[in-house]
Every structure is written in C-alpha cells, then in structure tokens.
Amino acid sequence: MFRLTIILILLSVYTEQASGGSFFLYNQVRHGVLMKVHCKSGDSDRGWHVRKYGGFYGFDFKDHILDKTLYWCNVWSGPNFSRNASFVAYESKLYKHRNNWIRWSIRGDGIYESINGATPWKFKYHWYGTPL
C-alpha cells in the first residue's frame, strides 16, 4: 500500500507539472486566398476553420503523460480549395522542450515551420494539387 501511495503521489506531481504547447497556422498564401484548416489528434478533433489572408488558427494543449501527443492538420487553399497538404503539426517526441510554441506559415510554395519564435522559418512540406 505504501508503494502505491508513493506512485500516486509521484504521478500527481508529474501530471500537475505536465505542460504542453501550442501551435498556430498563419495564412500567408496570397492576398484574397482563403485557407481551410482541419486539425485533430487521437482524442481531439478541432473542427473545420476558414481563415483569410493574414489570419491564423491555433490553440493550446497539454502533452500526454507518456509524451505521445500527436496533432496533424489538413490545409486547403486556392481556387475551390484545390490545393491541399497534410502534415504533423505537433508531435511531443520531436520537440525536446516543454511549452513549445510551434508556428506554421502556410505559403504559396509550401508550408514552413518556426519553433518558439526563435528559429528562422524552415521549409517542411509541399502542396498537392493545382498550382496557384
């Protein structure tokens, strides 16, 4: 019983300290071009959102206790949303520090990432579909 109590105390301390992060997707495709976004994880569906040029979509979350947090997003843009991309927006084991702030720039030539606002934009993903 004593061991169980210790384990529960340690677990509660860990979960109390558990932190997560946030990520934001910025529509930087082109003036007048809308961006449609759908992000989800294994247990959380964030729904569909449409953002105009210069707009963004994002949210905060908590990491899974065993570092199994994974969010992926689908984005569409262009005429009739004919261009699309699917990508991993956040995976806890890819980001070594807690409280990460991941920024995604959705552009005409692809999708770029910046971590915690401290790293320069880095090209990560290509579009599929009709070019703009």
Image: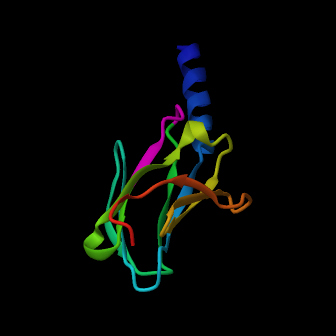
Q: Which residue is depicted at the point 45% across and 42% down?
A: 70
Residue 86 x/y as whole percent:
38, 52
Q: Is residue 117 magenta?
A: no
Q: Is residue 67 magenta?
A: yes
Residue 47 x/y as whole percent:
30, 62
The part of the chain drawn in magenta is: 65-73
In the rendered image, the residue lying farthest to the front is 131
75 over 81 or under it: above or below: above
Q: How many marks?
A: 0
Comparing 97 with 82, the one in front is: 82
Comparing 113 with 7, the one in front is: 113
Residue 28 x/y as whole percent:
51, 74
Q: Which residue is depicted at the point 68% across and 58% down?
A: 116
Q: Is residue 127 left or right of residue 120?
A: left
Q: Which residue is depicted at the point 46% across and 85% down?
A: 31
127 over 94 or under it: above or below: below
Which quadrant would residue 118 be assigned to in this image? bottom right
